[in-house]
Amino acid sequence: MLVELKQIIVSPGRQLLLKDISWQAYKSIQSELGVHRNTRTSYYRGVLEIMAPLPEHEVGKVIIGDLIKALLEELDIDFWSLGSTTFDKESMEAGVEPDDCFYIENEALVRGLTRINLETDPPPDLAIEIDITSRTKLNNYEALKVPELWRWNGTNLDINILVEGKYVKSDKSRTFPNIPILEIIPQYLSMSIAVSRNAAMRAFRASVIKINKK
């Protein structure tokens, strides 16, 4: 008996793995899932992962995204934020929906675009993944050539820089080389939860201005 996709329920914090999924089947499932949904997908060479995030996952995603936007604004760097947009590339048999992502160095190349085609357009310069319930796999991000990937596990932030096609763990951000990202992002994320978001954002902006003046 065949089971239709609409019959499958993925509980929050859980993931569903499907193997031997062709590119055409992956795109069909993407279409069937639709745009307005509470699941995210990741695809690499026939393996499709469907995930349903927990509320704490969404909190981390929003706060870290807000901190990055504040950082870019204080540094007066143009950017284009595309959230959990689906990025995929048939020639690499890879697809991903990051928790958040930013075009920074290549912002001018995608500014105003309503569709991104990685066969001709560059990938995001920075992607964010919240690894509360599972560890993000690197292979599809490597295949899509995303230059920098941050992974937050609820306690620690990992910075991964793409070097010759493979990610290397780094203590400095490629995008923000003069900012102590590993220190200040967790610090102000914790503050926003313990005190308040607005107080944390004000303190964060002030710290960035201070660092930038040195």
Image: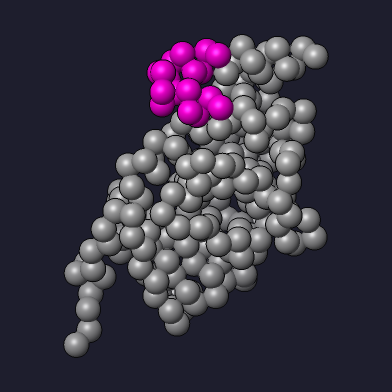
Tell me: 175 left or right of 66: right
Residue 28 or residue 211, whichever sits in front: 211
Tell me: 69 left or right of 197: right
Quadrant where the image shows the N terminus: bottom left
Q: Is residue 136 above or below residue 110?
A: below
Q: x, y (%) of residue 105?
A: 71, 37
Q: Quadrant of residue 30?
A: bottom left
Q: Is residue 109 above or below residue 211?
A: below
Q: Is residue 69 visible?
A: no
Residue 193 or residue 198, whichever sits in front: 193
Quadrant where the image shows the C terminus: top right
The number of callouts visible is 0
Q: Main secondary structure of the magenta part?
A: helix
Q: Residue at x 65, y 64 (%)?
A: 143
Q: Does the magenta-highlighted stretch encompass residue 188?
A: yes
Q: Residue at x 57, y 22 (%)?
A: 70
The colour style of the image is: one colour
Q: Residue at x 45, y 82 (%)?
A: 20
Q: x, y (%) of residue 127?
A: 58, 46
Q: x, y (%) of residue 129?
A: 52, 48
Q: Residue at x 44, y 34 (%)?
A: 62
List the single residue furthest toward the bottom. 1
Q: x, y (%) of residue 108?
A: 67, 35
Residue 115 or residue 18, whichever sits in front: 18
Q: Does the magenta-highlighted stretch encompass residue 145?
A: no
Residue 211 or residue 120, whichever sits in front: 211
Q: Is residue 129 visible?
A: yes
The stretch of residues the image draws in magenta is 187-203
Q: Quadrant of residue 173?
A: top right
Q: Is residue 137 above or below residue 130?
A: below
